[in-house]
Image (spheres, rainbow, N blue to C red):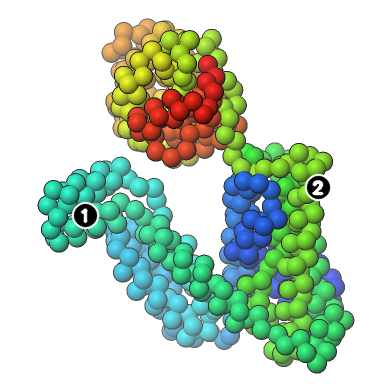
Amino acid sequence: IGGMVAPALIYLAINSGSGHEHGWGVVIATDTAFVLGALALVGPRFPTQLRVFLLTLAIVDDIVAITVLGLFYSESLDSTALAICVAALVLIWLFPRIKVWRSGAYLVAGTVAVVAAMESGFHATLAGMIAGLLVAAYPPQPKKVEKAASRVRAFRQSPLPEVARSANLSVAQALSPNERFQTVLHPITSFMVVPLFALANAGVDLRGGVLGDALGSTLTWGVVAGLVVGKCLGITTGVVTALRTGVGHLPTGIGKGQTVGGAALSGIGFTVSLLIARLAFDDVETQDHAVVGIFLASIIAVGLAWAIFKLAAVFRGEVSAGLPTKLDHPVDLERDHYLGPTDAPFVLVEYGDYECPFCGKATGMIRELRERMGDQLLYVYRHLALVDVHPHAELAAESAEAAGEQGKFWEMHVELYDHQGDLDIEDLIGYAAKLGLDVDRFVEDVQAGKLSRRVQEDAASGDASGAHGTPTFFVNGVRHTGAYDAVSLAEELRSGLLSATP
């Protein structure tokens, strides 16, 4: 919010009484593509986390900017065409609820919404943005993934056209329409549409004293100050306020100095700013002054960000902004749950979630890996309950700890993964009775929440180690990336490139 309010206020302060006040929308946007490109050039090494942080900021800025564009810079509205646009958007919202998953339906409804918006006088970019936000997005469902895999295996056995079509449809159905559109449209939009759009709106003839006139215009400097000073000041103030009040925290791996550098980089308004400038001002001269201001702001923002990143690296040691790769809390044999000899040369740590279907699949791989490596492997399990998507995961983790208090952690561990769909408290009590636990003590431990601290400590360790999803594996103390089948992990464990850290 600060990254949009501060630029607008600075612009209005500089242009008060100039007749250009209605151009305040020019300075609230951040160009996502250009910001990420500039980050790759002037940002810290491995800027993964900073890229996510800036991407989130830029997307919110763009959503607000396009909303402002649609509400404040649209022409007079045609109610009939606008009603058709709204109906098409409602239809897109309904599709996932009535089990419509084919891309064609979304494409037709989206096209109708955009065309109707254009005819209504309501800016089509806002209709397109709303349509994009309404397209269904959800994680792959394990049952559909398994169905797709079986159809693909059927095609390998019978490579016939009808079997191929069935396999293709099953694979498509396993993925959300949002992800499918993202994969197909990303190259087109990133490498053709956005560059052409920027070129079409960026044209300004600097001959005939245009540059000199622009440099003497309060409009130009209002745009520059709004984008450069306003973005940096507004975002930085917002972050500091959130940190001090405890409302939010920085993503793992990002330093405070890097946040300021990212805030400065957000002053690249470019694409959306150019579009709003063309709509906000009628005469060509005023438009040119705004465009020159946008160009100057982009250049200054990149230079300022480069300087801030360098200073953060020198004085604060912030040379990287990626996820941590080292296990933050080394294996503690007095605390951790483990299988295998304590003097094993190879150590595998898993952060898992009892309600995660992919963790459930990984249990078979772990058994195979332990059989392959025998006494050479020490396997450690830590909790990473993703409560936002798995509401029973934390309670299940606490029940495993409660069983561990009675010496049966691994027995409960197996029960929980064998019954991932049945993790209510009544189910957990049933598993405790089945394992011969003292049920009263088990219930008391779980319901009192006395073991939640242990689960939260594991989660904090995972976060500090860069484990943001499940399952996440650490091979000899280093986070594993890529496939996590038994063969891949065994090869990495034995590669000798990483030192064991029992």
Judging depth in this view, the residue of 330 and 85 nearest the camera is: 330
Number of marks in the rendered image: 2
Give, as a three-letter code, the residue at label 1.
Ala
Judging depth in this view, the residue of 422 and 44 nearest the camera is: 44
At 51% from the left and 74% from the top, the residue drawn is 193
At 21% from the left and 54% from the top, the residue drawn is 167
Q: Secondary structure at mark 2?
A: helix
Q: Is residue 409 visible?
A: no
Q: Which mark is residue 22?
A: none
At 43% from the left and 81% from the top, the residue drawn is 115
As drawn, 341 above or below 317: above
Q: Residue 90: horizontal and vertical position, in percent?
A: 40, 68
- Quadrant for the N terminus, please: bottom right
Q: Residue 480: horizontal and vertical position, in percent?
A: 48, 34
Q: Residue 199: horizontal and vertical position, in percent?
A: 61, 79
User: Would you name the residue on which mark 1 appears?
Assistant: 167
Q: Residue 390: horizontal and vertical position, in percent?
A: 42, 36
User: Would you name the residue on which mark 2 appears?
Assistant: 311
Q: Is residue 80 visible?
A: yes
Q: Do labels 2 and 1 touch, CB within 8 Å?
A: no
